[in-house]
Image (cartoon, rainbow, N blue to C red):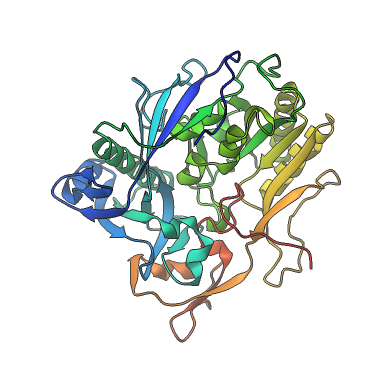
Amino acid sequence: MSIAKHHALAPHITHHWKKITVSDLDFAPATGLENGKLLIHRDELISRLQSDPNIRNVKVDIVHPGESVRIVPVKDVIEPRLSLIPGYQVFPGVLSGWDPDTNRIPSGEIVSVCGMVVTTVGSIVGFQEGVIDMSGPGAKYSLFSQKHHLVLDITVQEGIGRHDHEKTARMAGFKAADYIARHALNKPLAGNAHETLINPVYPGSPGRQGSAEPKGLPRIAYLYMLQTQGLLHDTYYCGIDAKKMLPRFMVPSEVLFGAIVSGNCVSACDKNTTYHHQNNPIVLELLRRDKTDWNFVGCVLTNENVTLGEKQQSSTLAAGLIASLIPDGVIISKEGFGNPDADLMMNCSKIEAHGIKTVLLTDEFAGQAGASQSLVDGHPDANAIVSTGNANEVIVLPPLKKIVGDDRVITKMAGGSSKCRLPDGSIAVELQVLIGSTNQLGFERTSARFI
């Protein structure tokens, strides 16, 4: 399926995205892909991960869709991928050195191992990790309930600091995903269906116009807000903690290569895991329908800050970069809630001040009855908002047969409480505890409406 049509007169980078679907997952004496079944050499994988001196122990488990299993507390979810471009490894800046300002990813192929994910769990150092239910009422709120999971339960060395703890678990997930991709995709891939992505604009060439751009179509840009508030609320772009960056242009299909990865412990419901960034549906849809329904003129990354001065600076710079693309409209997505609402509204109002229309994606925290103020900030120009659901909505999750991880921590999670456990073993929690249930990139089907 063609994600975006190529116009011969347009300068471009072409990334072919091939998807290899995994229909089953199991342990075996050797790691590889056989007739759609992914086989994992458990001891070899554990040995590789435990070569990290910060790791004391790794437990590896396999979980399948529809099983009576609860995975908790989930730290990250990653899709294994392999770059077929010589010298360009996945997760640039994380698993390999890479400077996005001088070393743009050239044309070539990226391959995904679809249908399965690497999921990391481990002890909580904050309180905002999450739950994935593979069956029952919680399963319908997460696309991850439909994936085969290779779950890594990471135990770090005693005395390790909080940030090193999180980095250790994060890196274990990336290393495992890379290990799987290299072993599963070591055979010729001819004959597999693929999707083609064309990047319509480059960093440093804002406002591209000319014969390559079909006339009469609206020019659409994307402002991609990253959670960067510190206190374990971190996102990384090419290995750089994004709170240390100013707003910047990004070649959109860099997301396919894992250029943006999660390192945060925000509320599970609207946390962007690495998988969410790798498969950002806003980027993919903008590329797929480029030159057909609109002209996708570029993507700008920006951060979410803590102080008022930093918010004002970033939003002014982000609005200026967006305006330089000369768009008719802009999609803005955010991550997290509360404090980031102020960043969202500043970005919206300053872009609108340039005469550019905006559409915002955000979830809501409107109270369990849905009657409270849903965002902590607002603006008259924020008049086109897509809601991805009320994270305070209460759901009762029944007891499941197997726990992978440790479910005792649910009482400490955002959306849980000391009274959330019911006499029959069920738990009454807010959607906040479910990974991605109100994801603000638009992955899930939950929304909200006025009543």
Quarter-of-image position of residue 25: bottom left
148 versus 423 height, above or below: above
412 versus 244 height, above or below: below
| Quarter of the rendering occupied by the C terminus | bottom right
In the image, farthest residue toward the left: 29
User: How many numbered marks, from 0 up?
Assistant: 0
Which is more toward the observer, 162 or 321?
321
Instruction: Judge from the rendering whether residue 302 lies leftward or rightward of residue 55; answer left or right.
Output: right
Question: Is residue 341 visible in this depiction of the protein?
Answer: yes
Which is more toward the observer, 282 or 413?
282
Instruction: Judge from the rendering whether residue 445 lies leftward or rightward of residue 265; answer left or right.
Output: right
Percent position of residue 245, x then y = 58, 29
Q: Which residue is at a point 73% across and 45% down the rendered structure image?
A: 342
Which is more toward the observer, 292 or 77?
292
Instruction: Judge from the rendering whether residue 249 lies leftward or rightward of residue 129; answer left or right.
Output: right
Quarter-of-image position of residue 399: bottom left
32 versus 433 height, above or below: above
Percent position of residue 427, x then y = 49, 76
260 versus 394 height, above or below: above
Percent position of residue 379, x then y = 83, 46
In the image, farthest residue toward the bottom: 423
Instruction: Judge from the rendering whether residue 206 lies leftward or rightward of residue 234; answer left or right.
Output: right
Q: Which residue is at a point 47% across and 65% down the rendered structure image?
A: 139
Percent position of residue 349, x then y = 81, 38
Q: Which residue is at a point 24% across and 38% down the rendered structure image?
A: 183
Quarter-of-image position of residue 189: top left
Question: Is residue 413 visible in this depiction of the protein?
Answer: no
